[in-house]
Image (tube, helix red, strand yellow):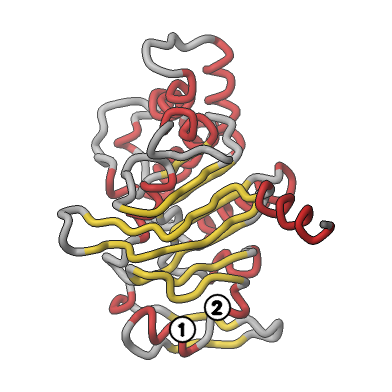
Amino acid sequence: MIAAGKAKEEIADMAIKVRRVSFSYDGKVEVLKDVSFRVGRGKFAAIMGPNGSGKSTLVKILIGLLKPTSGRVEVMGMDPSKDPMSVQRMVGYMPQRDSISKNLPVKVSEVVLLGRMSRKGPFSVKTPSDIREAKRALEYVGVPELFNRPFSALSGGQQQKVLLARALAVDPQILILDEPFSAMDVPSKDSIVDILNDLKEERGMTIVTVVHDVNPILHHLDLLMLLNHRLIAFGPPIEVLTSGNLLETYGAPVRTVTCESGYCHPILGDTHA
């Protein structure tokens, strides 16, 4: 009875549960094949894999933008395919920067407020409180001075920080990011890593991020997934990052460097993007 009760408690403590999910865009070629995993509340997880391996598709399924062909997903106990709006009110989503026009003719304030207003639903009117929260989100990511700047005038790294502020403006329980470090220099990456780690440690936020290069966040992660249409490996990074798993994921040997703490750092070139 104690074991059963503990098992139920552990299941209830899961922020994300994915069970045997498959997905196909055209009904023929499967982008995702029988993927299952769980992410506990307050955990920091990353998804790695080659281009076209289904990483972004999986993220879109988690937030209800896509419906799985088969299988079941639960985010904070809700099915995103049945109640996407409720899920999206609890999730801050940062899309790939490349999916948003870099010449978007809007101010930074409007970009961040768009995230804030999405939680309130259609036809909502922004309030002074919404504006304060948008400013607070920009301040949290370190760019409060950009509030009235045109989004299109920003550098790639600045745009990434604005998109992160947009995701945080909804005051989410879960943060889901798709390639948050693209177009960033090393200091900007370090800044984002510090922000994400603070969100996890100080706010207990659940974070799931797609990454090309896991090294900037490797020592902060609780969980790492290697994905190539199917789940190759999932668990603590020190167990997942083996030469065998990397070979199976990328289809070619991946050079690694092992640090003093025992972590295996993959060195991914353009061929493994």
Q: Position of residue 153 (x, y in %)?
A: 32, 37
> Against 253, is 86 above or below?
above
Query: Is residue 158 visible in the rendered structure shown here?
Result: no
Circle 1 residues within 10 Å: few <14, some 14–19, many ≥20: some
Which of marks 2 and 1 precedes in the sequence?
2
Residue lying at 42% horizontally and 42% vertically, measured from the top left: 63
Quadrant hosting residue 255:
bottom left
Q: Mark 2 and mark 1 in contact (Cβ < 8 Å)?
A: yes
Q: Is residue 27 visible?
A: yes
**Along the line of sight, the residue nearer the viewer: 28 or 99:** 28
Task: Give the x, y percent position of residue 27.
Answer: 17, 56
Instruction: From this view, report whether residue 177 is shown above or below residue 91.
Output: below
Residue at image coords 53%, 80%:
241
Q: Is residue 21 left or right of residue 74?
A: left
Q: Quadrant of residue 197?
A: bottom right
Q: Which residue position is annotated with label 2?
A: 240
For the C terminus, the image quarter is bottom left
- Is 101 displayed left or right of 89 in the figure? left
For the residue marked with disc 1, what is the amino acid? Answer: Asn
Image quadrant assignment for residue 1: bottom right
From the viewer's perspective, tell me whether residue 101 is left or right of residue 113: left
Residue bearing mark 1: 245
Q: CA distance from mark 1 to mark 2?
A: 7 Å
Q: Residue visible at 43% across and 68% down?
A: 48
Disc 2 marks a residue whose amino acid type is Val
Residue toward you, 16 or 114: 16
